Amino acid sequence: MMISPKILIPIFSLLCIVFANNENLSEYDGLKVIRVLPVNHFQMISLLNIEDDIDFWRRPDQINRFADLMITPNNSQRVMQYLSSRNIGYEILIDNVRAIVQNERNQMAKIRKQLEMLRGSDITVGFWQSYQRYEAIENLMNDLQDKYPNLVHKINFGKSFEGRELNLMRIGANSNEKKPVIFIEGGIHAREWISTAFVTHFANRLLIGYENHEEDIKTLMETFDFYIVPLLNPDGYEYTHTKYRLWRKTRSTQKSSSCFGVDPNRNFGYEWGGEGTSSNPCSEIYPGTKAFSEPEVKAETDYIMNNLAGRALVYVAVHSYGQYLLYPWGWTDKPTPDNDRLDSMAKLATEEMAKRYSSKYIYGMSTKVLYAAAGAGDDWAYGSASIPYSYTLELRDEGYYGFQLPPEQIIPTSEEAGDGLIAMLLAIQKNDL
Ligand SMILES: [Zn+2]
């Protein structure tokens, strides 16, 4: 039977989708995520001792609290033996990482197809129904600047290791150099896609709210200038879209090793290289050869120091997952002199975050809630840049999907996190200004 060319084309494009979706998936074969529960100090230390060469999706934080780690066909036997010899209980959290990656790809391909027909000239239509690539995020910034020329200014602040432009958006009404600054950092860890999605959603929410004369948003836009970095680690982020979904670090090359990348959230120059880091360049928590070795971290911190010093009032680094709102210190268990103030704002924000969808966010000082991690952005912002309100926000979920949060959760996650942030900023505006 002859097949007409008209039929051949759709069959061919269908095959392309199938092949594209299967590309490189064998890398995920046999990967599992297990959840462990340390119930005493010895078990806790035992887990921290293997942090060097195991990919912890959620770090061991406290006795009697779960940690999640990914095991591979190469290390699963060794890890299981290690755990059982120390009586550390575990359960399988994700039995088949490959299936989740496959599912995520299929879902995103389907949504992309539907949106192509819908979108037209407005890039924001459907933008938060799926996770976006670097180029789309750049286009979003351009389009928002075109659409709201008096409210949005796109600013280049450097280049990534692989040469991608690092850009941020300044958003505010009547922006000027006297307004206090809210600095929001998204996308520092490559695989935490929801971070960039939330940060861009929040930017758009401010703009729409201002245009619609929403009282709270109007107050914030008139009081503050927002500096929003949607994607601080574009090289790692693109790598998660094209090569390996679970990449965390930057993509810089290392002189002493064939392993790539540095954990950028251990690369900030405040108590750099202390607890919760590893000198092994292959480790997920490798802080680099020195503080600010990563051009992305260097560019962001230079920009803050050179342009926003003295004006920056709030810094929020957005990550996933676990549902936490944390404040310094992360390098020591001693509280900062501002502990009460930081704590009351975090309490208020997390209460607000729970209102819309009953999501529970845990708040507290980093080392009280989690284990120490030196060289992170929030400690640098508070300790070196003297930004009085410094936070790390870990978005959804609590571990069911981990980093591969389904696209249909982008909007609800962004809404609830945005609610918390808005409430906190209004309170800061009332109390401090
Ligand atoms: Zn992170």
Image (cartoon, helix red, strand yellow):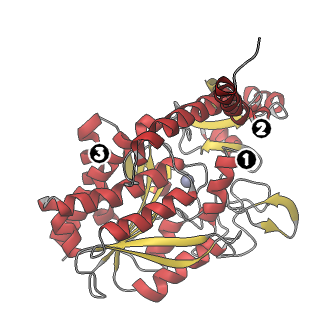
Coordinates of residue 79 in the picture (x, y in percent): 78, 33
On the image, numbered disc 1 is attached to which residue?
243
Numbered badge on residue 24: 2
Is label 3 in a helix, a strand or a loop? helix
Coordinates of residue 328 in the picture (x, y in percent): 45, 64
Is tag 2's residue or tag 3's residue first in the polypeptide sequence? 2
Q: Quadrant of the N terminus?
A: top right
Coordinates of residue 262 in the picture (x, y in percent): 71, 63
Mark 3, ligand 1, within 8 Å: the answer is no
Is tag 2's residue or tag 1's residue first in the polypeptide sequence? 2
Q: What residue is rendered at 16% in x and 66% in y?
A: 218
Q: In which quarter of the image is residue 142?
A: bottom left
43 and 420: which is toward the camera:
420
User: Foreground mark, 1 or 3?
Assistant: 1
On the image, numbered disc 3 is attached to which residue?
353
Residue sitting farthest toward the top: 1
Q: What residue is rendered at 46% in x and 78% in y?
A: 155
User: Within 10 Å of the Cα at label 1, are there few (<14), some (14-19), or many (20+) other Cα atoms?
Assistant: some
Q: In which quarter of the image is residue 76?
A: top right
Is label 2 in a helix, a strand or a loop? loop
**Looking at the image, do the residues carrying marks 2 and 1 touch, with CB atoms under 8 Å apart?**
yes
Q: What residue is rendered at 70% in x and 71% in y?
A: 161
Q: Which amino acid does label 1 sit on?
A: Lys
Q: Which amino acid does label 3 sit on?
A: Met
Can residue 405 be spotted in the picture?
A: no
